[in-house]
Image (cartoon, rainbow, N blue to C red):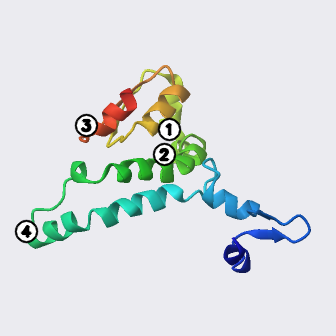
């Protein structure tokens, strides 16, 4: 802890002899609702390191590596990494900006059918379905374990 305090990553109060994490550091490391939360990125990156032999073989043979062949931590880490950004932007700015607001107008009117292709665990599909309940949203993903994860 003293090393981390000396590096400025955490604070140390000599009077109370306690360590604390500055708010701006907590936003990155522990606040899963922060748009700068990065722990999912570290989780996904660690999956790549475990996959080094698979990646080398894919390059050596030219056969590639299917999304389904990745370490499960990649899928979970990707969702954790992107979730706060989706929550902050999907409904408030991304959808309203599509086709000068026409997409959002149609969703608000209802009756639209939306296919979320490559939906992963279905986070964005569920968000849109809750926001526009009079429309139909279907998530598709070729990675069966991600779909099964959502069903559980």
- Does any portion of residue 59 appear in the rendered image? yes
Q: Position of residue 110 (x, y in %)?
A: 48, 22
| Foreground tag (4 vs 1) | 4
Give the farthest residue toward the right: 15
Q: Residue at x 29, y 38 (%)?
A: 145
Q: Helix, strand, or loop for circle 3?
A: helix
Q: Mark 3 or mark 1, which has the lower sequence index?
A: 1
Q: Residue at x 87, y 72 (%)?
A: 14
Mark 3, Cα crowd under 10 Å, few <14 / some 14-19 / many 20+, is few
Mark 1, Cα crowd under 10 Å, few <14 / some 14-19 / many 20+, is few
The answer to whether the residue labelled 4 contacts the one labelled 1, judged by CB atoms less than 8 Å apart, is no
Q: CA distance from mark 2 to mark 3?
A: 30 Å
The answer to whether the residue labelled 2 contacts the one labelled 4, judged by CB atoms less than 8 Å apart, is no
- Does any portion of residue 106 appear in the rendered image? no
Residue 102: assigned label:
1
Mark 2, Cα crowd under 10 Å, few <14 / some 14-19 / many 20+, is few
Q: Position of residue 25 (x, y in %)?
A: 68, 64
Residue at which label 2 appears:
98
Q: Helix, strand, or loop for circle 4?
A: helix
Residue 61: assigned label:
4
């Amino acid at each position: 802890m003293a090393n981390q305090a000396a590096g400025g990553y955490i604070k140390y109060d000599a009077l109370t002899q306690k360590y604390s994490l500055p708010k701006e550091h907590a936003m990155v490391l522990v606040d899963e609702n922060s748009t700068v939360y990065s722990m999912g990125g570290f989780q996904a990156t660690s999956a790549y390191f475990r996959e080094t032999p698979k990646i080398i073989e894919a390059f050596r043979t030219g056969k590639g590596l299917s999304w389904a062949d990745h370490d499960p931590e990649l899928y979970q880490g990707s969702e954790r990494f992107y979730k706060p950004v989706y929550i902050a932007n999907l409904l408030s700015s991304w959808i309203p900006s599509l086709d000068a607001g026409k997409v959002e107008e149609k969703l608000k009117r209802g009756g639209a059918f939306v296919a979320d292709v490559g939906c992963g665990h279905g986070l964005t599909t569920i968000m849109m379905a809750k926001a526009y309940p009079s429309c139909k949203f279907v998530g598709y993903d070729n990675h069966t374990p991600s779909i099964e994860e959502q069903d559980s």
